[in-house]
Image: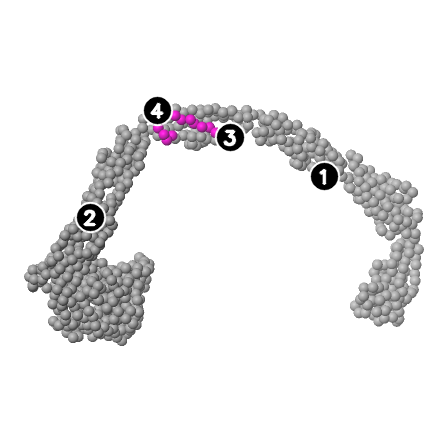
Amino acid sequence: MTCPRSIILCGLAVVWSTGSAQISVNSSITAQQLVEDVLLGVGVTASNITFTGAANQRGTFNGIASNIGLTGGVTLASGDIANAIGPNDGCCSGLGGGFFGQGDQDLEDLSGQNINDAAVLEFDFVPTGDSLEFEFVFASDEYPNFVCSMNDVFGFFLSGPGINGPFTNNAVNVALIPGTNVPVGVNTVNNGEAAGDPANCAAIDPLWYTHTGWYMANGDGFTPPFSTVPTYVQFNGFTKVMKAKAVVSCGATYHIKLAIGDAGDTAYDSSVFLAAGSFQSNAVDLASEIDFGGEDSTIYEGCGQVTLVMSRAEDAVAQSFQFLTQGQATEGADYNMIPNIFTFLPGEDTIVVSITATLDNQIEGPELVEVIAITNGDCGLDSTFLQFYINDAPLILLGITPNDTLPCNDSVFVSASVSGGYGPLVIDWSAGILDGTNGDWVIPAQTTVYTITVTDDCGVHSPTASTTVFVPQPDPLLMAVNDEEVNCPETEVILTAAVNGGTPPYNYLWSDGLGSAPSVAVAPPLTDGWSVTVTDDCGLTATDDVTVTVLYDTVEVFTSLDTSICRFDTAMLSAFPSLGFGAYDLQWSDGGSGELNAVQPSYSMDYTVTATDECDIQASDEVHVDVHFPSADFSHSTNDYVTDFPIQFTDHSQGAWEWLWEFDYEGEESNEQYPVFSYPEPGIYTVVLTITDDIGCIDSTFKVLFIDPAAHFYLPTSFTPNGDGINETFGASGVGVLDFEMRIFNRWGENIFSTDNVAEHWDGTLNGGAVPDGVYVVWFRMRDVLNIKHEHFGQVTLMR
């Protein structure tokens, strides 16, 4: 792979995307792709790439949206690499392990414990320079509870020409804490709090050492924000970004084994993260530092500089290299000229070059500068790239409070909003406000202009802004309110205080709790008065009184006297309104209107008249109409009558004072309340009762009587109780019957039915059961209305 690595990674075969706000992993990449397309940087070629372990123990990661410290690269784990995905909401990623039996002798020698779940990526490589380096982060869920107990470790075991170490193939472990010979592991990089007695940690692990400055705590799996925010990875702790380094010979073949595993058991997994493109070998190393007038990888025009630091690993001999620049910015125009050749003298390992950006007063946006250091060593040409940007000096954004007017006996706050620029901002006020502050309260004696000027460390931009505080000179305060007259009580009147002079704004205070507005609404029922006091912004006051006169006398109304009528007659009611204001609207409770109201009630009732004047004020009066409606009603002793039989008539009328009975026989009448009358001849007669009450109201009713010539009686000779609804029972019928008795006998003379009620009939049964068809003997005896007795024996035939 030939793409160089610089402070801005370029051209990696794997393109990282931000994805969601957490770390993401991919275990579908082959071991060869992991090394050749992701891990390798400049100056290295690889071969014989192998991996030992489960497929999900190795892959790529994207750390841009996480707190792991690396943007992306290769990850190896003692469990599933997906266990790294945050947030840290569990006690232990991959609890229980997964690969179990896979061990590694070098890791066991390094940790002093047996190793399980090992993941091992190894390959041969040829460097083009005389040094090797790559960046990494170690993370584990053994933190913090198993420090000085379980020493989950990993190792970068390098072997080849000139290397003589204690591990397989005379390899050395280059996964060391920077500046030390101490290998990186749970027991060597931690928070300094041992699970056991710290005094015994050296006996447990000879390499025990608490390098707390390289440790990053990441929660316990339960505590926010680590357990709630996805940007936090799943592990309880991890190291800061470290760099592994080694001296190599260019052109020689070396072998490296990158290994990690669980120590002692298979639980609480660990991972190592290797920065993409960081596995590299350069004869000359480039680094940059923004000294002044810039930030990150950018410097500003006319301000500050970037310092390029060129270094090499071997300083025994003189060495020259070519120095080229390219990009959007133009050397000599956008920044100073730089020599094309630099030479390391014997014993010299560092060369420093300063680059400054030229102020051209043109808005151009960021311009890329790419620096290339080319060396021609024993292994041929080798290039190292570095990038930075030149940008326009950042603008200083300045805003100031708008013009204002000084309130009397008060102050005005004058302030500016300042942002942008580079470095500390210098604030200079023209007068009245302390320099270096964003503003203050001011009380000028006269109208004053306040000006602010802001500069930054670059001095390229120096904006200015001004605001004016006006100090007014008001006229005397005058105020008046006009009196009002209204015809009707509770008429709304708007009272307005007219104010001149003084210093606005004005404050108003009306009496009787009317409020504090310039205009108020009142609606007095009677003549009334108020006062209003106005106070201007300077505290001056003025007062005036106002009267609202109500020109009104209360409306009245009277009605005609109570009256009595017969039902369906008409009563004429009258209303007499007076006083009030304007015309009257007269409304009666029955819907009538006007001074006269003709009513025809069906029952006694009261009528109310309401008079409403133009002030919408009302008065009412009531008149009673008593309705008489006598009700005629009577009854007679029975419905069966014969000639010359006396009939008793009973009066049931309501409200009657007089009675007139008309019997419909030759003009016969009676004025008694309970008359008795006998019809000497049979026929159909209509009896009419007419009543009159105390005021002459009349009502009448009638009933029809059927008068038979004499008593008569009927008894059938057969019946058919077969359920067809016809002739189902046997019995007597007639009129003029006073007493009655009947018996029925069978052929043996047994009495099978008896009754003394002429309306009760025999249904052809005995004790609930049907009797046989045949002829039965009937005996009856009766007395009619003429007191004549009758007795008879006969027969009746029953047929079903």
Q: Which residue is mark 1?
A: 603
Is there a contact, CB below 8 Å, between mark 2 and mark 4? Answer: no
Upstream in the sequence, badge 1 or badge 3?
3
The residue drawn where x is 90% and y is 46% is 678
Upstream in the sequence, badge 1 or badge 4?
4
Front tag of 3 and 4: 4
Where's residue 486, x and y in %?
53, 26
Camera-nearest residue between 64 and 437: 64
Quarter residue 751 falls in: bottom right
Is there a contact, CB below 8 Å, between mark 1 and mark 3? Answer: no
**Label 2, label 3: how many angstroms apart (C-alpha)?**
73 Å
Q: Which residue is mark 3?
A: 492
The kind of residue on which mark 3 rests is Glu
Front tag of 2 and 1: 2
Is there a contact, CB below 8 Å, between mark 2 and mark 3? Answer: no
Where's residue 635, x and y in %?
82, 47
Front tag of 2 and 3: 2
Question: Quick one: SS at disc 1?
Answer: loop
Camera-nearest residue between 322 and 611: 322
Front tag of 1 and 3: 3
Q: Which mark is residue 513?
A: none
Colouring chosen for the image of the structure = one colour
Quarter residue 633 falls in: top right
